[in-house]
């Protein structure tokens, strides 16, 4: 029997063949302290993504006029930049202090100014997606008996409230990445020496979270570190992907609303829903015709960009269709697909192979615990099965297809 070489696919793809993505940052000293827009640009470039990035970030600047400083809503510089391009995304970093108090309380002037800024951005291009920056608070919080992580969580919650009340756009969950890094990387200081502004590491974490929110690509295997220790940078990119795609946050931040769902049957990918146009990409290169389905002829990372009823383009998450290496050209490949992904805990596993071998299917939770196990002895052909993981709750799961010597792994997000 010929041995099948199973390869775990990397989630990095290059999408340089896609049209240039234009991103404007409106922020303050938190934005420019270690140049979050520049870090974001370099992350995108390292992924082969063509981006144009601009910014207006001045010390003490909020969306509203505060403390004698003109806010973005009235700034001639910000207004000129808003109308200078048809932006794909505008990242809005407001004064995080306005969101650090009791959940549900945001100063009226802050809410009113964000409503006006929203309308200003949409008047320039109704398809521009606004990315609201849910960031961090100062070390120790802002009130008596407070602590850093509780304060950061309030900023996240209030930013969700702002988005839900006026915009229904997208929140980038930097707050959750921040708290996760505080727990998992305690030796890494996310703060500058003033305990308020971000350090280089904190800025890199924010940039990685924004990158994942916008491009919906796992950045773990990107090479760019921005000057952060390589191992730390990789851990931060892993945190960014885990947080952005975590089921609860994926819904709460409204990212799911702007993410069409892909399903797979055999080697055919289909985007769910009715759209006016479709463009499929394999490893970043445009493939296929203007159709809701695409028949894959090789393994790779697939993504589709669709035009919705408003005439705006939105993209799916990347789905990796694994076709393993084979020992000779006459053998058919082995493929493992899991769809839909993300899902509500119900999903279909599909295997296709002409190589007769003993297979083990396992599903593990984020803790590495096996919650499902099945054996296929001397199996070849097509195998499909719907699995129900709803009793295990939402979260990240891993589907493994194992032989005696090799395995392939798929990440599944259940919301």
Image (spheres, helix red, strand yellow):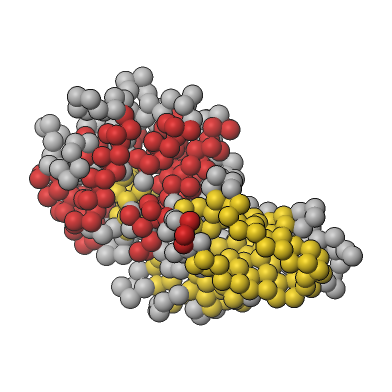
Q: Nearer the viewer, residue 76 or 43?
A: 43
At 22% from the left edge and 28% from the top edge, which residue is drawn? Answer: 142
Does residue 44 appear left or right of residue 152 in this picture? right
Q: Is residue 27 above or below residue 253?
A: above
Q: Is residue 200 above or below residue 238?
A: above
The quarter holding residue 361 reads bottom right
Residue 201 percent location from the top left of the image:
45, 31
Image quadrant holding the N terminus, namely: bottom right
At 75% from the left edge and 75% from the top edge, which residue is drawn? Answer: 381
Q: Is residue 220 above or below residue 358?
A: above
At 42% from the left edge and 31% from the top edge, which residue is drawn? Answer: 182
Q: Nearer the viewer, residue 385 or 294?
A: 385
Residue 96 percent location from the top left of the image:
25, 37
Q: Is residue 359 visible?
A: yes
Q: Nearer the viewer, residue 80 or 411?
A: 411
Does residue 229 appear left or right of residue 84 in this picture? right
Q: Residue furthest top?
A: 193
Q: Is residue 28 above or below residue 199?
A: below
Residue 408 percent location from the top left of the image:
68, 56
Does residue 135 appear left or right of residue 95 in this picture? right
């Amino acid at each position: 029997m010929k041995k099948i070489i199973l390869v775990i696919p990397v989630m990095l793809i290059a999408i340089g063949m896609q049209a240039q993505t234009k991103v404007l940052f409106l922020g303050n000293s938190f934005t420019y302290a270690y140049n979050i827009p520049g870090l974001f640009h370099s992350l995108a470039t390292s992924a082969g993504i063509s981006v144009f990035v601009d910014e207006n970030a001045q010390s003490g600047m909020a969306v509203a006029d505060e403390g004698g400083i003109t806010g973005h809503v009235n700034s001639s510089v910000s207004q000129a930049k808003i109308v200078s391009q048809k932006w794909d995304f505008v990242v809005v970093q407001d004064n995080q202090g306005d969101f650090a108090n009791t959940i549900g309380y945001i100063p009226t002037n802050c809410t009113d100014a964000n409503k006006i800024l929203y309308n200003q951005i949409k008047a320039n291009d109704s398809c521009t997606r606004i990315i609201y920056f849910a960031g961090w608070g100062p070390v120790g919080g802002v009130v008596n008996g407070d602590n850093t992580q509780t304060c950061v969580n309030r900023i996240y919650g209030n930013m969700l409230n702002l988005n839900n009340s006026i915009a229904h756009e997208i929140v980038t969950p930097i707050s959750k990445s921040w708290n996760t890094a505080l727990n998992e990387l305690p030796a890494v200081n996310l703060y500058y020496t003033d305990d308020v502004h971000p350090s280089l590491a904190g800025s890199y974490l924010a940039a990685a979270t924004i990158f994942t929110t916008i491009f919906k690509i796992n950045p773990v295997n990107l090479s760019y570190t921005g000057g952060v220790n390589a191992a730390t940078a990789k851990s931060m990119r892993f945190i960014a992907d885990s947080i952005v795609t975590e089921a609860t946050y994926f819904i709460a931040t409204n990212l799911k609303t702007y993410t069409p769902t892909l399903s797979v049957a055999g080697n055919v990918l289909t985007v769910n829903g009715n759209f006016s146009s479709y463009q499929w990409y394999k490893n970043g290169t445009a493939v296929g015709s203007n159709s809701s389905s695409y028949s894959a002829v090789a393994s790779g990372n697939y993504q589709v960009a669709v035009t919705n009823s408003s005439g705006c383009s939105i993209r799916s998450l990347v789905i990796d269709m694994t076709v393993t290496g084979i020992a000779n050209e006459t053998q058919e490949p082995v493929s493992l697909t899991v769809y839909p992904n993300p899902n509500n805990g119900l999903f279909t596993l599909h295997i296709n192979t002409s190589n007769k071998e003993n297979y083990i299917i396992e599903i593990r939770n984020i803790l590495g615990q096996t919650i499902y196990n099945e054996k296929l002895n001397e199996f070849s052909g097509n195998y499909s099965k719907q699995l129900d993981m709803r009793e295990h709750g939402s979260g990240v799961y891993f589907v493994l297809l194992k032989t005696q010597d090799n395995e392939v792994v798929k990440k599944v997000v259940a919301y």
